[in-house]
Image: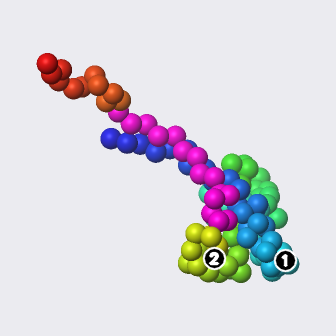
Amino acid sequence: MIKIDEVETYGWQAAIRGMRNPKNSWEKSDSYPAVDCGKCGVIDRDGICHPKEHDCTPFACYAVGDNDLKLMETLGAAGTDHGKYLRMITVTADITAPCTGGRNTIPTR
């Protein structure tokens, strides 16, 4: 069985800035760093959640706004040349899988 843990993504802000570069439309960007608090369910636009009973720093994220999402969908549908912003988003994960590198095979002669 394959198990995937600790999935993280990086580079959202740079990818959004890069996809808006050709048209100099940075002022239309509506994405922002935020905190998606798993305990209180609040997405805070300032990027900081200050409850007294728990710590929200592990829930830091980057919220993609409606304008940026629409542009991403349009560029992605236009083909690989226009969807190159996707190459700037990095995804990392820990993958645990059984090792079957020859130990479980039957030797033949």
x, y (%) of residue 26?
Answer: 83, 75
Question: What is the span of residues highlighted in magenta in the rendered image?
Answer: 84-98
SS of the residue under disc 1: loop
Q: CA distance from mark 2 to mark 1?
A: 15 Å
Residue 44 against residue 106 in the figure, above or below: below
Residue 75 disc label = 2
Residue positioned 68% across, 58% down in the render = 88
Q: Residues within 10 Å of mark 1 (few under 14, many from 20)?
A: few
Quarter location, residue 12 = bottom right
- Mark 1 is on which residue type? Asn
Residue 13 against residue 19 in the figure, above or below: above
First-in-chain label (2 vs 1):
1
Q: Is residue 66 left or right of residue 14?
A: left
Placement of the C terminus among the 4 image quadrants: top left
x, y (%) of residue 11?
Answer: 71, 56
Q: How many discs mark residues in the rendered view?
A: 2
Residue 104 against residue 16 in the figure, above or below: above
Q: Residues within 10 Å of mark 2 (few under 14, many from 20)?
A: some
Residue positioned 57% across, 74% down in the render = 79
Q: In front: 32, or 38?
A: 32
Report which residue position mark 1 lands on. Answer: 24
- Mark 2 is on which residue type? Leu
On whether residue 87 falls in the magenta region, the answer is: yes
On whether residue 17 falls in the magenta region, the answer is: no
Q: In front: 58, or 15?
A: 15
